[in-house]
Amino acid sequence: MSKMIFVNLPVTDLKRATAFYEAIGAAKNPQFCDDTASCMVISETIFAMLLTHDKFRQFTPRPIADARSGSQVLICLSADSRNEVDDIVGRAEAAGGIADPSPKEEFSFMYGRSFEDLDGHMWGVTWLDMAAATTQPDMASA
């Protein structure tokens, strides 16, 4: 069985956040949703769990960070092409997100952009030509 990842994100307006993630291509799995949480299926193995602040607090005693003023994590999704990168970021912006809060990454073997969701969570979207990338002398600096 493939490993799955569940990214738990605190959101201020669950209905609005759910609509945002649907607009960028995620599907809502109603089996794991209620008035405190939305399970957004990004792929067969990646899920974003959108949680109200009260629900999020049930999982940690730590205060909820303000994603607009600090960073704790940067989430990055792969894309199959440069066009898919642009499409996802474009849909995020059209749904009320902020396009390209981080600098674009553009190399012959890699193309990346980013968006900020309605609560300030930063997402990267990257296309990578693995065959060309293996010929690069220092991938870590890309």
Image (cartoon, helix red, strand yellow):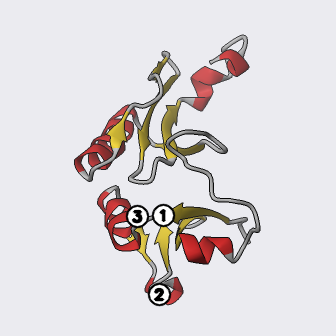
Query: What secondary structure is found at the residue carrying circle 3?
Result: loop
Residue at label 1? 11
Q: Residue at x 55, y 67 (%)?
A: 44
Task: Tell whether 47 sits left or right of 98.
Answer: right
Q: Which is more N-terminal, label 3 or label 2?
A: 3
Residue 46 placed where, x, y %?
A: 58, 62
Residue at label 2? 34
From the viewer's perspective, is the residue at label 2 or at label 3 nearer? 2
Amino acid at the residue labelled 2? Asp
Task: Report the residue that reaches farthest toward the right.
Answer: 61
Q: Which mark is residue 26?
A: 3
Q: Which is more N-terminal, label 1 or label 3?
A: 1
Q: Quadrant of the C terminus?
A: top right
Amino acid at the residue labelled 1? Val
Q: Which is more N-terminal, label 1 or label 2?
A: 1
Residue 103 placed where, x, y %?
A: 46, 22
Q: CA distance from mark 2 to mark 1?
A: 14 Å
